[in-house]
Image (cartoon, rainbow, N blue to C red):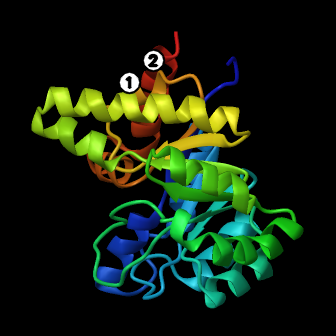
Amino acid sequence: MTKRQRLGVNIDHVATIRNTRGGIFPDPVRAALLAETAGADGITAHLREDRRHIRDEDIEALVAALTIPLNFEMASTSEMQEIALKFCPHAICIVPEKREERTTEGGLDVVNDQSRLSDFIKPLLDVGCRVSLFVEPDERQLEASAEVGANVVEFHTGAYCDYHAKGSNKSALEELTRISQCSTFAHKLGLEVHAGHGITFENVSPIASIPEVLELNIGHFLIGESIFTGLDTAIHKMRRLMLDAQL
């Protein structure tokens, strides 16, 4: 694998800060444009059912403003499908969503929802969107993802990142091995491999070193780090760590 690994920057939590106060500041579109200038390869935005951070008007503004791809994260509901078909973003990442969760807690169960997901993503594929499924690194889920017609799988890296943060080195290594092996398996199935959730400066290198992982999507950490260093500095450092890991 020789393709340059891409960095997608999730700007949801700029909107979270805005929404805690009301009004229009800080503007997630401005953050997206800053990320683009700093070298982000794409912008991710998750329009949740309860609109807790990104709102419909943010999606519309991002589509109009960006010259890099927008990765539109959404649940597999008819409402979200309608919005996606209206804007036809470059990429759509379908994620599981529960109203009570603070953040996405795991991957889709594609195996047990295969027929419905196949029907759900077909109109999105038909209009030219690249469809990604957010899944756990599990071979059965990958086989089902390929069968429903997804172009991409994005591995939920939360377990690895949690073990790493707790200093549970053996468990972190086991999870990393699972991600690596499933990345190879997904590639053999013809699926492009992405990864994201919980990635920081401290834990990114082992994930970035997996040859089949072509894109990392990172949000909460970069937005938090930008408070101290600025968003461009945070993105530049993450990009440098990713590049170094591939040497």
Q: Residue at x 57, y 22 (%)?
A: 211
Q: Secondary structure at mark 2?
A: helix
- Counting from the top left corner in percent of width and height, residue 39 is at 60, 37
Where residue 222 appears, as percent x and y from the top left, is 37, 47
Under mark 1, the amino acid is: Pro
Amino acid on which disc 2 is placed: Ala
Furthest residue in direction left, as rendered: 167
Could you say which disc has been placed on residue 206 in the image?
A: 1
Q: Residue 233: which numbered mark, if any?
A: none
Residue at 62% x, 69% y is: 114
Q: Is residue 42 visible?
A: yes
The earlier-in-sequence mark between 2 and 1 is: 1
| Label 2 to label 1: alpha-carbon separation | 7 Å
Q: Is residue 217 left or right of residue 132?
A: left
- Nearer the observer: mark 2 or 1; the answer is 1
Number of callouts: 2
Q: What is the secondary structure assignment of the residue under circle 1? A: helix
Dot label at residue 245: 2
Query: In terms of depth relative to the viewer, which is nearer, 1 or 89?
Result: 1
**In the foreground, 100 or 219:** 100
Query: Which residue is found at the position 39% from the left and 82% from the top?
Result: 52
**In this rendering, position of residue 206 left or right of residue 144:** left
